[in-house]
Image: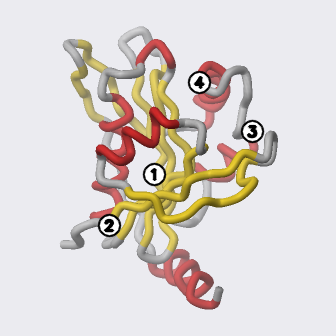
């Protein structure tokens, strides 16, 4: 516990927030914009969660606001279509020498196009720029499609967290990816 706390203190006191410059990306012939999440995006992020999580909204407006305005170094980005629709997003924060992926979602109409991989790759770059040794995340045990993607991207199972998801007490698979620090 003390090690985790000292890692958090180190992150808050000495962590550097690396700026994120928006960029145009191409996926399967379609051009999209990748940019930081801002306050006015939150309503659309919650709608995207409803789409992905079968009507549920795991994160509230206040949870999103707390994360994107946190003093802890973090990266919250989204991919926006030409029609100005948020197609997917990811959030992460630095804790010691780990970058923890707090939230990731890709709209059902945009899945299986490489968007999730692209978002995770951006967070991995952020982690490496911040000298992190690992990426971590939790995923529902029932979400085998996401687990398959994470394994393909180099994550491995670390342990099972019992009753992690409070709304239905489902267990989570804790996953980690070891990074090559420069």
| Residue contact at pointers 2 and 1, CB within 8 angstroms | no
Give the answer, above or below, for where 27 lies relative to 61: above
Q: Earlier in the sequence, mark 2 or mark 1?
A: 1
In the picture, the quarter occupied by the C terminus is bottom left
Up-down: is 171 above or below 131?
above
Q: CA distance from mark 1 to mark 3?
A: 18 Å
Q: Where residue 7 appears, x then y in whole percent?
A: 52, 82
Alpha carbon separation for disc pair 3 and 2: 30 Å
Q: Which residue is mark 2?
A: 178
Q: Earlier in the sequence, mark 4 or mark 2?
A: 4
* Residue 100 position in % (x across, y down): 49, 60
Disc 2 from disc 1: Cα separation: 19 Å
Are the residues flagged by discs 3 and 2 in contact, CB closer than 8 Å? no
| Residue to which mark 1 is pinned | 75
Instruction: Give the labeled residue for mark 4.
Output: 52
Instruction: Characterize the local packing of mark 2: few (<14), some (14-19) or many (20 or more) Cα atoms within 10 angstroms.
Output: some
Q: Label 3 belongs to which residue?
A: 60
């Amino acid at each position: 516990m003390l090690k985790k706390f000292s890692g958090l203190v180190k992150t808050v006191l000495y962590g550097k927030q690396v700026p994120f410059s928006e960029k145009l990306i191409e996926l399967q012939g379609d051009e999209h914009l990748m940019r930081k999440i801002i306050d006015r995006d939150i309503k659309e992020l919650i709608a995207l969660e409803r789409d992905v999580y079968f009507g549920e909204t795991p994160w509230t407006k206040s949870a999103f606001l707390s994360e994107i305005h946190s003093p802890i170094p973090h990266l919250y980005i989204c991919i926006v279509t030409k029609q100005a629709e948020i197609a997917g997003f990811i959030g992460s924060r630095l804790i010691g020498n780990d970058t923890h992926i707090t939230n990731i979602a890709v709209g059902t109409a945009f899945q299986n196009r490489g968007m999730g991989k692209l978002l995770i790759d951006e967070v991995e770059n952020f982690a490496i720029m911040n000298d992190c040794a690992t990426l971590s995340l939790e995923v529902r045990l029932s979400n085998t499609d996401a687990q398959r993607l994470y394994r393909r991207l180099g994550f491995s199972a670390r342990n099972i967290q019992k009753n992690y998801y409070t709304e239905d007490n489902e267990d989570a698979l804790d996953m980690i990816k070891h990074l090559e620090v420069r």
